[in-house]
Image (tube, rainbow, N blue to C red):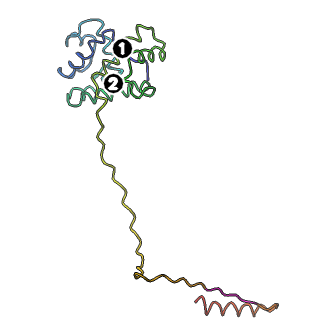
Amino acid sequence: MEKAAYTTKPATIKKFFQTIQDVSRPSKVTYSYLPIIGFKSSNDRRLIGVLKFLGFVDDASVPTQRWNDYKNKEKAAQTMTSAIKSSYDDLFSTYADAEKRDNATIHNYFAQKFGLSAQVAKLTEQTFKQLCELADFEAVAVTEPVAKPSAPPMKEVAEIPTGVRPITININIQLQLPATEDTAIYDNLFSALKKHFFS
């Protein structure tokens, strides 16, 4: 996670994101654009940094698909949740329920992680908390059901009649061969075995 962006006026965050839903998608979100939609203070300019950090605009300040998704009020909370979790990924790696953590915990995390002053850490913490109020962390993602692999076909097994126990027959053949150097005797013996037992 890169150093988290913040605004010096965290209280304006909710109003700003509500405005995103109410205005047309701009070609760029610039300093000159903000006063047009009602954010005239020079302190509001930091909102652009927050938008870039969250992925609502790209490095050239052009609105992204995430901006478009947020304009859909039915998808807005889920879109913000996704933006927060991906942008503050390291924070959520440290605290899986970061959105529920108290202000002091979040403040201390930012201060220690990035070596921020107490004032900047406070603004970064407040920015995070304000954004979390626009998200829905309890929403359950709907996933497509995973198709279960079909079971391999069972091999056909011959049925044994009820009450009949299978019979096992073992044949043990022992041969005693005479001591001889005549290989023809052994050849004839094995030929006979092959003919009568293994044919």
Q: Looking at the picture, how far across and down is residue 99, in whole percent?
A: 35, 24
For the residues marked 2 and 1, what is the alpha-carbon distance in whole angstroms? 14 Å
Answer with left or right where residue 140 lies relative to residue 90. Answer: left
The circle drawn on residue 139 is none
What residue do we see at 49% from left, 82% from top?
166
Q: Is residue 96 above or below residue 146?
A: above
Q: Residues within 10 Å of mark 2 (few under 14, many from 20)?
A: many
- Identify the image quadrant of residue 53: top left
Residue that lies at the very extreme toward the top in this rendered image: 42
Q: Element at badge 2?
A: loop
Residue at 26% x, 6% y is 41
Which of 124/160 is in front?
Answer: 160
Residue position for label 1: 6
Q: Is residue 173 magenta?
A: yes
Look at 38% across and 22% down and name the residue there: 101
**Residue 8 shown in magenta:** no
Cβ–Cβ below 8 Å for labels 2 and 1? Answer: no
Q: Note whether 131 is above or below 190 in the view shown.
A: above
Q: Position of residue 175 (x, y in %)?
A: 72, 89
Residue on which the image places disc 2: 55
Magenta residues span: 171-176
Q: Residue at x 40, y 79 (%)?
A: 159
By secondary structure, the bulk of the magenta-drawn segment is best described as loop
The amino acid sitting under disc 2 is Gly
Query: The C terminus lies in which quarter of the figure?
Result: bottom right
Q: Earlier in the sequence, mark 2 or mark 1?
A: 1
